[in-house]
Amino acid sequence: MNSHNRLIIAVDGPAGSGKGSVCRAVAQRFGMAYLDTGLVYRALALHAIRHGVDDWQQLVGYAATLPLNFVQSAAWLDGEEVTLALRDEAVGQRASLLSAVPSIRAALLDFQRGYGGDRDAIFDGRDVATVLFPEACLKLFITADLAVRAQRRALELQLRGEDVSLDDVRFRMSERDARDAARSHAPLTVAPDAVVIDTTHLTLEQTMTRVMGEVERIWLAAGRRLPLT
């Protein structure tokens, strides 16, 4: 627990591991604020694509005062609802490139750390437990084999009506994994005190049960009452 008596749960892991679905469920059950930190980079990438901005320093200035808001499950950027646009594959690829730039990561730190105000919160991303909130009361690293993660992401995109092939999704995901793990600043890595959950052979329900158990443990340790189910 941090100095403001705020419970922070940090969840890291690669794309397609299932951490987003789990975090949303935890946030809903425990009444926590939730931020997918990847959406912050995607918002910056969307702005760059739409406005043809390739100058990283110009993006740093925009990032420092990022006009991104979340209303329930909808994302708003510059006053425009961009929930679906943020999930575009091209936006995701650009976001991965931008996330490797130290000055951009630094410019977005305050936005991410301040998200939710004094509310208990759960954050998911690549460096939440190692950089954003090393003091988090619970750190989870959720992962799965590349083949399984690619199948999950391809199905997700196809259900949205996108024409994608499994091979393409797997290739792009492999590239992003390598980029996230190899970057010199805030790479994707397992925090020493993180609980590692491999979802390769788990159903979503099984993963939920495992994670909820970890959250309940720290919730009770903080003297909180469990919410009614």
Image (cartoon, rainbow, N blue to C red):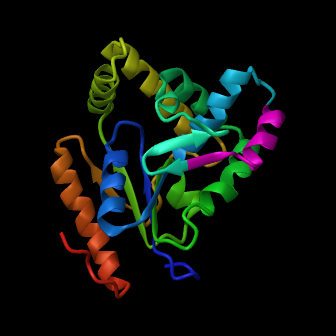
Spot the residue most to the bottom: 223
Residue at point 42%, 41% (across, down): 14
Residue at point 32%, 23% (across, down): 154
In the figure, 227 relative to 70: above or below? Answer: below
Quick check: 150 left or right of 95? left
In this picture, which residue range is highlighted in magenta? 56-69
Quick check: 59 left or right of 155? right
Point out residue 92 in the picture as x, y percentages from the top left corner. Answer: 53, 29
Point out residue 200 in the picture as x, y percentages from the top left corner. Answer: 23, 40
- Residue 144 in which image quadrant: top left
Quick check: 135 left or right of 58? left
- Residue 182 in which image quadrant: top right
Quick check: 224 left or right of 178? left
Question: The C terminus is located in which quarter?
Answer: bottom left
Residue at point 54%, 78% (across, down): 2
- Residue 114 in which image quadrant: bottom right
Q: Which is more toward the observer, 149 or 9?
A: 9
Point out residue 52 in the picture as x, y percentages from the top left corner. Answer: 74, 20
Point out residue 11 in the picture as x, y percentages from the top left corner. Answer: 42, 56
Spot the residue most to the front: 79
User: What predominant SS class does the magenta segment belong to?
Assistant: helix
In the figure, 180 relative to 193: above or below? Answer: above
In the figure, 15 relative to 225: above or below? Answer: above
Residue 66 forms part of the magenta stretch:
yes
Q: Which is more toward the observer, 162 or 74?
A: 74
